[in-house]
Amino acid sequence: MDIETPLDDLADGPLEVVGRLTSASNVVLQCRTGAGDLCAYKPASGERPLWDYPGAVLALHEVWAFEVDCALDWGLVPPTFWREDAPLGPGMVQAWVHAAPTSDVDVMPADGVPAGWLPVLRAEDERGRDVVVAHRDTARLADVAVFDALINNSDRKAGHLLGDGAAIVGIDHGVAFSPEPRLRTVLWGFAGRDLAPRHISALGRLLERPPQLTTDRDGAAGAALLLRAQSLLAAGTFPEPSPGWPVVPWPLW
C-alpha cells in the first residue's frame, strides 16, 4: 500500500485538522501529522447511532480491523490507531491511502463476463439491460473475502477497496464485529470454494496468537472473533450467503 506515514507519528504525534470529507455518513476529518503526512481521523463523538451497533463503537472497530490484519500479516488494512488525545476527542486515526477505488469490481453486460472474473449478482441497468456485478478472481480479493468473514464485515462495498491487483487495501471497517451474523459483501464470487493453504495457515496463526483488541474489556469481541476463525477452519471453504439477512451492501459502491 502506498503509505509513507511513520507509525509512531500516527500513533502518538501531533495532529492538525486540515479538512473534512463531506460525503461520509459520519464525521471524517483529514489531518496532518507532525511529519507532514495526511491521515484520516474519525472521532467517536461524530458517529451517527445505528440500531445494531449501539454506542460509539464504529471508530474502535476500525482499530480492531487493523489489529486482526496484523495478526494475519496480510497488509490489507492501513495502519490504524486509537487516539485518546485527538483534536475532537477520542477516535481512530488511519494512514491516508493515496489510491483510487478499485477497478477489480465492476458492472458488465450479463453475457460479457470475461475469463478471470466471478459474477456476484444480476441486475438491470437504467435502460433495462441485463447486467452483472462481478469481481476479479485474484488471490488478493480472496484474502479480503476471508478477512471480511473473520471480522463479520457488514459493509464491504466496492468503494471501500482502494487500489488494484496485489496492492488492494480495505477501509471503512466500522460496521463489523457484530455478535450476530452480518456478512454483507460484493465479493460473493468466492462462495463455496475451498480456502487456500495460506488462509488455513493464517487462521491457525491467529488462533495460536490471538490479537489483543483495544479496549475489549470483557473479551467478548475477541472470543467471537476466534469462534469465527474456528468455524472457517472447520468448514474449509469460503462462506455462502445466509438467508434472513441482506447479503450485499447498499449502495454497492
Image (spheres, rainbow, N blue to C red):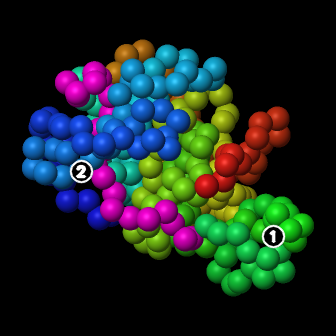
Q: Main secondary structure of the magenta part?
A: loop
The N terminus lies in which quarter of the figure?
bottom left
Q: Separation of disc 2 and disc 1 at Cα?
A: 38 Å
- Based on the displayed image, in which of its 4 quarters is residue 253 positioned? bottom right
Residue drawn at the location 81% of the way across and 65% of the way down: 125
Regarding residue 101, the answer to whether it shows in the image is yes
**Residue 206 % position (x, y):** 41, 44
Q: Which mark is residue 38?
A: 2
User: What's the magenta region?
Assistant: 85-104
Q: Earlier in the sequence, mark 2 or mark 1?
A: 2
Q: Which residue is mark 1?
A: 131
Residue 24 in the figure: left or right of residue 31: right
Position of residue 226 measured from the top left corner of the image (x, y, whole percent) = 50, 35
Instruction: In this rendered view, identify the residue nearer to me: 121 or 29.
Output: 29
Residue type at mark 2 is Leu
Q: What residue is rendered at 29% in x and 64% in y?
A: 2
- In which image quadrant can residue 130 be found? bottom right
